[in-house]
Image (cartoon, rainbow, N blue to C red):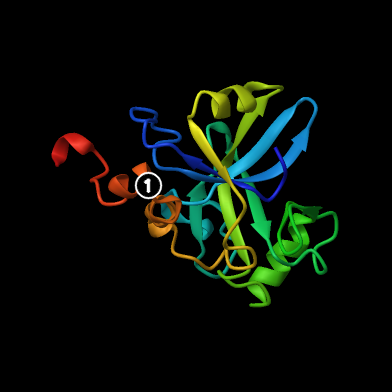
Amino acid sequence: MESGKLLVADPSVLGDQNFHRSIVIMAHQKDSGSLGFILNKPLDYELNDVLPEIKLDFPLYYGGPVEQDNLFFIHNAGHLVPESIRIDEKLFWGGDFEKIIVLVNEGVLTRKDIRFFLGYSGWSEEQLEQEISAHSWVVIQNPLAGKILSCKSQDLWKDQMVALGGKYLLWSNTPENPSHN
């Protein structure tokens, strides 16, 4: 799975609290497995609730079920943050966290430049390919390249259902729990 692509959870992924209606950006691929972050699951608290040294309010997102007690981040400032790992032409993950704190507190990095996650989504070798073959995920090129950090996370999945069209269009307007329809 190529870094920078998006995984869109198929509507059939009901009952999976981790990935139901999720959009995952793939950040890293190795022979041993894949790593990504769920873009559209904000948590009920802010970054400075877990990191008091951050002076500004930044939303904190659920990145996935792996290492939920660790903080991860994606950003568009690879030129400013040493040790950043390239996702695509405009997006990076990780890097020198002390530098991130300085850039955030100085206002150089805003909500449109960086997103913070607790945990990540990970798959062992061939696991993701099996899930894609089982139609749990729809793989798409990132239509929001360069804008992914500033888009409204609550609309991401619905917008992708509309963009996919066909059988997915029906799902764009269904409630989170279809039994409430």
Does residue 10 lie above or below 126 as drawn? Answer: below
Residue 146 spot, x, y in % from top left? 64, 67
Q: Is residue 71 left or right of residue 14?
A: right
Residue 19 spot, x, y in % from top left? 45, 35
Does residue 112 lie above or below 116 as drawn? Answer: below
Q: Mark 1 — residue?
A: 166
Badge 1: how crowded within 10 Å, few (<14), some, or many (20+)? Answer: few
**Residue that appears at 63% across and 63% down:** 145
Q: Nearer the viewer, residue 60 or 101?
A: 60
- Amino acid type indicated by mark 1: Gly
Based on the displayed image, in which of its 4 quarters is residue 110 positioned? bottom right
Does residue 93 lie above or below 132 as drawn? Answer: below
Q: Nearer the viewer, residue 91 or 99?
A: 91
Residue 63 spot, x, y in % from top left? 54, 43
**Residue that appears at 32% across and 50% down:** 172
Instruction: Name the residue furthest left.
Output: 181
Residue 62 spot, x, y in % from top left? 49, 44
**Residue that appears at 41% across and 57% down:** 159
Q: Nearer the viewer, residue 126 or 103?
A: 126
Q: Is residue 102 left or right of residue 63?
A: right
Q: Where's the N terminus, which quadrant?
A: top right
Q: Nearer the viewer, residue 75 or 161?
A: 161
